[in-house]
Amino acid sequence: MHGIARRISNLACLAYARVGHRLAGIDFVARLVSRVGPECTRLLLTRYGALIGPETRFKDGIQIDNASGDQDARDSFENLVIGSRCYVGKGCFFDLPDRIVIEDEAVLSAGVKVLTHADCGDRVMSRYYPRKREPVRIGAGSWIGVDAIVLCGVELGRCCVVAAGSVVNKSFPDYSVVAGSPARLVKTLAQDGEATSADTS
């Protein structure tokens, strides 16, 4: 009985999204994603273009920005690719003018923000900081700590760890442990589970 009720609820969610999408576009669906439970989150993301692997789990409150309205927006969630057996924590934020790829078994803790562009618009500051748009890739098995920010153009290798609250503005290779704002290499994990400290001299 409980499973039947859940299926009906998911069908109602999809029907509501379909009507809202027809009237107000993908931004309506993005707002709905932020308000529904984990199961409907996955359904909405995949229905409107995201690729999500099996056994990936979501918490609620997922935020999607710039699926439309931006000059490079796709009017869909197709720039979001999440592998299998991933975990996406409560309130994670995805900026979608460019592609975000999260590989298998990666963990995004609560409040993680992934940005694929930086743009102050048609204002005086654009002379100094022109628009930047680049994809982000988070490698398989990586763990991104609570409230960390991953900026456009960053590629994290396999099994990287990003400390809570860090701001990652450059790429790091496999098995890197990084922390700080901007994030710096703290140590490198060995494949046998041991770790070596980074040379900070």
Image (spheres, rainbow, N blue to C red):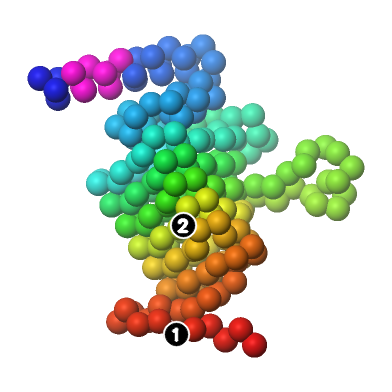
Residue 157 lies within the magenta run: no
Q: Looking at the rendered structure, which numbered label has been put on residue 93?
A: none
Residue 78, percent from left and from top: 46, 38
What is the spatial separation of the Cα atoms under label 2 and label 1, in whole angstroms?
Answer: 20 Å
Q: Is residue 22 above or below residue 52?
A: above
Residue 18, percent from left and from top: 40, 16
Going from N to C along the chain, the mark reached first, 2 or 1, is 2
Residue at 50%, 58% in the rendered image: 164
Q: Which residue is mark 2?
A: 145
Residue 199, percent from left and from top: 57, 86
- State the quadrant of the C terminus: bottom right
Q: Residues within 10 Å of mark 2 (few under 14, many from 20)?
A: many
Q: Is residue 18 above or below residue 103?
A: above
Q: Is residue 91 left or right of residue 121?
A: left
Residue at 37%, 32% in the rendered image: 41
Residue at 80%, 52% in the rendered image: 129
Residue 9 lies within the magenta run: yes
Q: Which residue is mark 1?
A: 196
Asked whether residue 78 appears in the rendered view, the answer is: no
Asked whether residue 190 appears in the rendered view, the answer is: yes
Q: Which residues are magenta?
A: 5-12
Q: Residues within 10 Å of mark 1 (few under 14, many from 20)?
A: few
